[in-house]
Image (spheres, helix red, strand yellow):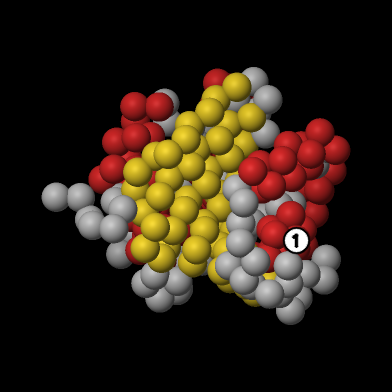
Amino acid sequence: MATSTGSKLNLQLQEFFDQLAPNWDREVTEERLECLSNIVRELDIKPGSCLLDIGSGTGTILPFLIQTTNHTGKVLALDLSLKMLQQARAKGFQPVVDFIQADITAIPLSDNFADLAMCNSVFPHFNNKAQALKEIARVLKSSGRLVICHTTGREAINRFHQSVGGVVANDLLPDESQMKELMSQAGLAITHLEDSPKRYLAMAVKMTQAPG
C-alpha cells in the first residue's frame, strides 16, 4: 500500500500530466518518432506477444508496438493520468489496445502476464522506483523483458526535469550503478544499457529465480 506521502505525490503528478495532456503531442517531433521506431524495431518483438506500455501517455509509441504484434497480440496502455489516456484512446487504437489508469506500484494485472514491458519517457517519474520495478517484474512472464527508453541522454533528461521544477524537480534517471542495483533487487538483470546524447536505452530480463 502506498504511503500517504507517496499518494500525495502521485496525485500531484497525475494533476501535472492531466494539465499537459491536451498539448502533449505538439512536443512529439519526427526525430523523436524515428528514434522510438528504431528502438522498437531493435527489440525483435514476436507477433502474438502481450505488451505493456507503462506511462503510455497520449500513445506516442503505440503505433510501433502494434505493428510488431502483427495485430495478433495484445497491447495494454497504462498511465496514471486519465487525461493522457483519453487523448490516446481518441486515436482509435482499439481493439488491439486496452487502456488502464493505474499507479505503477499497483498494476491491476495477474502475475506472469506480459512478454514485454515498455517504459518510454516515464521511469524518472516513478516516486518509488524500487517498488515500481518489483511490480513490473511480477507481471512479466519468466524471461520477460523490461525496456526503459528516452529520446535523449540521461544528463539532458535530469537537467530538464530540474529546470521545470515543481512536482518533477526530483524525477531523475538513476546512474548506471544505481540502475543495476535497483534492477537486481527486483529480480531483473540488465542485458543492455546505452546512454548517448540522442537516446537512452536500458533493457533487462526477468530472472527465473528471485534474488536471494
Q: Is residue 125 visible?
A: no
The relative height of residue 199 versus residue 61 in the rendered view (above or below) is above
User: Which percent across, then down, holds residue 188?
Assistant: 34, 48
Which corner quadrant holds the N terminus? bottom left
Pick out the residue farthest to the left.
212
Q: Nearer the viewer, residue 7 or 29?
A: 29
**Can residue 188 be spotted in the picture?**
yes
Assign a secondary structure to mark 1. helix
Locate residue 154: give its quadrant.
top right
Viewer-nearest residue: 163 or 66? 66
The location of residue 102, given as percent across then percent down, is 51, 66
Q: How many marks?
A: 1
Q: Position of residue 200 (x, y in %)?
A: 58, 31
* Residue drawn at (70%, 59%) of the image: 68
Locate residue 60 relative to residue 127 in the image: left or right: right
Q: Could you tell me which residue is drawn at 52 percent across and 57 percent down?
A: 117
The residue pinned by badge 1 equals: 67
Residue 74 location, quadrant: bottom right
Q: Residue furthest bottom?
A: 95
Give the crowd class for mark 1: few <14, some 14-19, many >=20 residues within 10 Å. some
Instruction: Please state which of residues 82 and 198 is positioned toward the viewer in this rendering.
Output: 198
> Left or right: where does residue 95 sit relative to residue 118?
right
* Image coordinates for residue 185, horizontal then vertical, percent: 26, 45
Q: Residue at x 74, y 79 (%)?
A: 95
Q: Residue at x 35, y 43 (%)?
A: 189
Tag 1: amino acid: Gln
